[in-house]
Amino acid sequence: FYEAYGVDAVMLVEHSGLNPMGGKARAGCPIVNLQQTLDGLTDAGFAVGVYEELSDFDAPHMGTRKLKVRALTQVVTPGVPVYFHGAATRRGEARFSEGRPYAGVRYTADGIVLVEVRANSREAFIQERLTEEGLRGHIDLLGGVADPVYVMDWPQRLRALLPRTRNLLSVPATSRQFAEEICRCVDQELAMHGTRRHAIPHR
């Protein structure tokens, strides 16, 4: 059984449809509903840390009493939304979801450059000369993109399209260099969450 307290419990009630327990700021779910519960949070743009209780063999002892110890096993994000802990030992197939891609956009005189980074498949795709409507349509087709979106030279009038952005400090000269910079930024973002620690190639 997985449970949360305080503000975390409020987020579970609001975004995952759980009921408060005991009339307090406490909510939880059984293991069979864990992925569905996490999906509610990642769909809302949250990164979620999942803690597991260690086995009796791994837990430390204080005299004759065993202490309950919990450890962070994974951080799921909108870009990497599937919780894998223990999936290899379960019966049946584990459900897999690619998740929303991370993205970088750059406004140029020739149109918008979009870099789409798929963290699970470790691929990056570049699209150039997009119009504003073309960008909107492509983001809708993807089902949205993961936050934050990395931007360069992004006009103020388009802020509503990508409300959570992060400006790049360096100025890559070409679309390929821009894609390499986006891959580097995504890799740092995932490493910060403990999800990925190797560079993401692009093509």
Image (cartoon, grey):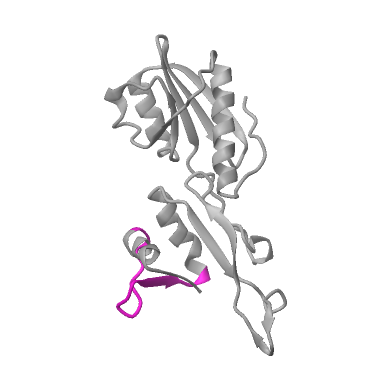
90 horizontally vs 12: left or right: right
Residue at 49 percent across and 36 percent down: it is 102
Front in this rendered view, residue 189 or 161: 189
**Residue 42: percent from left, percent from top:** 44, 51
In the image, residue 114 lies in the stretch drawn in magenta: no
| Residue 53 placement: quadrant | bottom right
Q: Where in the figure is residue 152, as x and y percent of width and height? A: 43, 22
Which image quadrant is residue 162 in? top left
Q: Quadrant of the C terminus?
A: top right
What x and y, as percent, mark residue 172? Answer: 54, 17
On the rendered structure, is 35 left or right of 108?
A: right
Q: Residue furthest front?
A: 63
Q: Residue at x 63, y 34 (%)?
A: 200
Q: Is residue 11 left or right of residue 191?
A: left
Kindly give the residue lying farthest to the right in the view shown: 57
Q: Nearer the viewer, residue 189 or 113?
A: 189
The location of residue 189, given as percent across then percent down, is: 54, 41
Give, as a single range, the part of the protein colored magenta. 15-31
Q: Is residue 25 magenta?
A: yes
Examine the rendered structure and indicate whether residue 106 appears above or below residue 32. above
The furthest residue to the bottom: 64
Q: Where 165 sits versus 130, above or below?
A: below
